[in-house]
Image (cartoon, grey):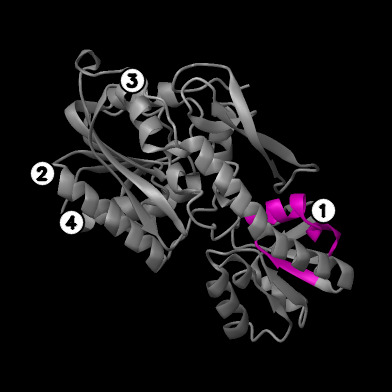
């Protein structure tokens, strides 16, 4: 049982068990979504330790896209505008982006004239691409291993803090990397919004790497204890991922000057319960489609070896279908197997003309469908899940 990273209590209520199946695995694994009985923080328990998670991120390329999607570019513009509105920055401010990927967000600062920019990224491929594409200083390191020569005036973490197991340790380490009264910007999924609307993709927020589910209250509890004072926190919806993010700007401050008393999180549990119910309802028509594909016995290509395919193999009859190949653009996955099914690059489609293709993606479904009909002039049936998740 993972203890609560906010209050260190070890008593938690389980509200969901999420199963996963990933390339190279012979059987499914799981984590439990739990809520701390003491402070109300929601998080995943029964997870790998931080070193194992770091290895997972080092191997991952699922967020490496050389061409920045317009929807993701809009998100970065919103993050950047929020920072510039609420933080007093100078062109020579030293800026560190933690978990920078290949540097898409960090490049936004470069375009605006900031020149003392550094990124750290556990994926070697992403770090290399950031150097090649944007000419940015992106080091293949983690927060634990990174030792800069000088402290920073701003540190940013966009979609990163929800991935970290040792939250207290990491926040403490981040504090030491900042100058006195420097800024910390964090963007994380807003757990208070999870249950407000039916999700674009059921259980998407319970990806293997998503192990912390922050509300404004729990995020503030964590950061005040880590020596940070709140400047501004707001929730913004983005249509690219179909969810809301907390945009939070904090300033480094002496802990003695902060009120570190823990405020109970009264919103996370109910929001997650509603989200789970919405997700189950979303899953029903999709499960019916998977059953139809299994019953038909028709040869099937699955495009996508990511978290959606993982959930479908665990929770529906997709694994019973006559799958002949799995397609994924992630070169790190190509040549491996998913539940015994070979994973190929898109060029392998030429070996299966006229075969039915299941697009196991919601975020990139339209792009993949366009590639099939355009580049490959696909004559086979194309099955998408977009209508079932709107």
Q: Which mark is residue 90?
A: 2
Considering the image in quadrants, where does the C terminus appear? bottom right
Which is more toward the observer, 68 or 33? 33
Query: Mark 2 or mark 1: which comes first in sequence?
Result: 2
Instruction: Indicate the position of residue 175 as horizontal and vertical percent values.
Output: 29, 25
Query: Mark 4 or mark 3: which comes first in sequence?
Result: 4
- Density class for disc 2 (Cα within 10 Å; few <14, some 14-19, many ≥20) is few
- Determine if residue 238 is in view: yes
Say which element carries label 4: loop
Which region of the structure is painted magenta?
300-321
Residue in the picture at 76% in, 76% down: 356
Q: CA distance from mark 4 to mark 2?
A: 11 Å
Tell which tag, 3 or 1, sits nearer the viewer.
Answer: 3
- Density class for disc 4 (Cα within 10 Å; few <14, some 14-19, many ≥20) is few
Q: Which mark is residue 340?
A: 1
Instruction: Indicate the position of residue 71 as horizontal and vertical percent values.
Output: 40, 65
Residue in the picture at 15% in, 40% down: 93
Please give left or right for residue 123 compared with residue 354 in the image: left
């Amino acid at each position: 049982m993972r203890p609560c990273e906010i209050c260190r209590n070890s008593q938690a209520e389980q509200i969901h068990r999420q199963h996963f199946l990933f390339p190279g695995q012979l059987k499914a694994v799981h984590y439990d979504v739990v809520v701390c009985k003491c402070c109300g923080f929601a998080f995943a328990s029964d997870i790998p330790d931080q070193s194992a998670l770091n290895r997972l991120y080092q191997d991952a390329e699922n967020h490496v896209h050389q061409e920045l999607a317009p929807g993701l570019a809009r998100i970065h513009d919103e993050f950047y505008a929020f920072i510039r509105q609420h933080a007093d920055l100078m062109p020579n401010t030293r800026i560190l982006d933690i978990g920078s990927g290949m540097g898409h967000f960090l490049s936004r600062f470069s375009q605006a004239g900031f020149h003392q920019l550094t990124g750290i990224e556990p994926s070697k491929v992403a770090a290399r691409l950031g150097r090649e594409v944007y000419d940015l200083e992106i080091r293949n390191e983690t927060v634990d291993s990174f030792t800069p020569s000088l402290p920073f005036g701003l540190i940013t973490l966009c979609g990163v803090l929800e991935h970290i197991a040792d939250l207290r340790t990491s926040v403490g380490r981040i504090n030491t990397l900042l100058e006195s009264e420097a800024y910390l910007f964090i963007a994380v999924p807003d757990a208070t919004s999870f249950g407000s609307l039916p999700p674009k993709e059921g259980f998407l927020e319970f990806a293997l790497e998503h192990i912390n589910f922050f509300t404004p209250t729990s995020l503030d509890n964590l950061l005040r204890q880590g020596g940070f004072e709140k400047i501004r926190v707001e929730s913004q919806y983005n249509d690219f991922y179909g969810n809301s993010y907390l945009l939070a700007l904090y300033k480094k401050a002496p802990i003695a000057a902060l009120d570190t008393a823990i405020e109970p999180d009264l919103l996370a549990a109910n929001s997650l319960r509603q989200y789970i119910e919405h997700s189950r309802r979303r899953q029903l028509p999709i499960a019916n489609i998977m059953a139809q594909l299994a019953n038909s016995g028709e040869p099937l290509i699955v495009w996508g070896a990511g978290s959606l395919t993982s959930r479908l193999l665990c929770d529906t009859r997709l694994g019973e279908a006559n799958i002949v190949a799995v397609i994924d653009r992630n070169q790190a996955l190509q040549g491996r197997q998913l539940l015994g099914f070979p994973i190929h690059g898109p060029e392998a489609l030429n070996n299966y003309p006229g075969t039915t293709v299941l697009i196991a993606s919601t975020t990139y479904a339209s792009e993949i469908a366009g590639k099939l009909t355009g580049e490959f002039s696909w004559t086979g049936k194309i099955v998408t899940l977009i209508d079932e998740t709107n």
